[in-house]
Amino acid sequence: MSGLLALLDDVAAIAKVAAASVDDVFGQAAKASAKAAGAVIDDAAVTPKYVQGFEADRELPIIWRITKGSLKNKLLFLLPAGLLLANFAPWAIAPLLMLGGAYLCFEGAEKIAHAFGLSAGHDAPPPGADKKVIDDPAKLEEHKAQGAIKTDFILSAEIMTIVLSNLPESNFWLEAGALAAAAVIITVAVYGSVALIVKADDVGLYMAKNGNLGLTRRVGRGIVIGMPYFLKALTIVGTAAMLWVGGSIIIHGMEVMGFDTLGHLIHDAAVAVAALVPAAYQATAEWIATAAMDGVFGLALGLILIPVGEKVISPIWHTLSGAKKAAGHAG
C-alpha cells in the first residue's frame, strides 16, 4: 500500500512539473508572439485580397486551405529550421531578423509607392505572362491559394524568427513547445480574424434583410457600408506596422553589431519629445516617438530597396519560377 501511495505521489509530482512546463510554454509563446505584431497585422491585412472575386460559398474553404498551408509552413519547415538555428547557429538569428526587417520595410514602402502610382508592385506579372489561369475559376482558386501560401511563408518566417529571438533561454523541448504554440496561436488568430472580416459583409447583409428589429437592420447596413473602409484602415495600419517593426528590427540589429549611433539618436530624440508632456504621459510619448522614428527610417530604407526588389530580385524570381514551370510541363 505504501508503495502505491509513493507511486501516486511521484505521478502527482510529475503532473505538476508537466503542468508548470505547459504554463511556461504558453506563457513564453504569448509574450514572444506579441513582439511579432507588425508582421501578424500585415498577414491579416494581406490575406483577404486572395478571396476577392470568388463566390461567397468558396471564401471559407479557400481561407481554410490557406490556414492549413500556413500551419504546414510554420510547423513542418520553419519550426525545425528555427530550432536548428537557435541551437547550432545562434549568431545567424540577428542577420536573418535584419533581412526579414528589410523585407518588411520594402513591402511597406512599396505599398505606399503603389498607392501614389509610383510602383506597379513586385508581384505584378511580367510582360507576356500566361494569363489563361484567370479564365478558369478552379485554376484561379488554385493560383490564389498557392500565392497566399507562398506569401504566408515569407511572413511566417519573419514571425517565427521574431518569436524565436524573444524566447528566454531554455531547454530544447521548451523552445520547441513555445515555438509550436506560438505558431498555432498566431495562425488561428490571423486566419480566424480573416474569416470574420471576409464574412462580415454577408452577416451584415443578412441582418439588414432579415432582422426583426429596426436596430438590427441598421447595424447590418452599417456593417455592409463600413467594411470597405475597415479593410482600407486595416491595410493602412498593417503598412504602418510593417514599417515600424521592420525599421526597429534593423536599428536593433545594427546596435547588436556595434553600430549604435542611429539607435542612440532616436532614443535621445524620443526622450526629448517625452519631456514636453506631463510626467504621467512621458513613457507613452517616448514609445510613440520611438515607433514613429523607427517607421520613418523603415520607410526611407524601403524606398531605397524598391528598385532592388522590382528591377533585380523580382525578374530573377520570375525567371526561375518560369523555368521551374517549364521543366514541370516538360516532365
Image (cartoon, helix red, strand yellow):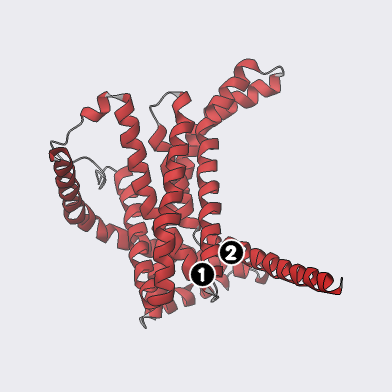
Percent of width and height locating residue 118 = 25, 46
Q: Are marks 2 and 1 in contact (CB under 8 Å)?
A: yes
Q: Report how many numbered discs are placed on residues in the image.
A: 2
Percent of width and height locating residue 264 = 44, 79
| Element assignment for label 1 | loop
Which quadrant does the C terminus fall into? Answer: top left
Q: Which residue is most to the right?
A: 1
Residue on which disc 1 sits? 166
Residue at horizontal 75 percent and vertical 72 percent from the top = 10
Q: Is residue 71 left or right of residue 307?
A: right
Residue density around tag 2, few if under 14, some if 14–19, many if 20 or more, within 10 Å: some
Residue 5 against residue 133 in the figure, above or below = below
Regarding residue 11, the answer to whether it shows in the image is yes
Residue 191's tag is: none
Closer to the camera in the image, 249 or 282: 249
Mark 2: amino acid = Lys
Mark 1: amino acid = Asn
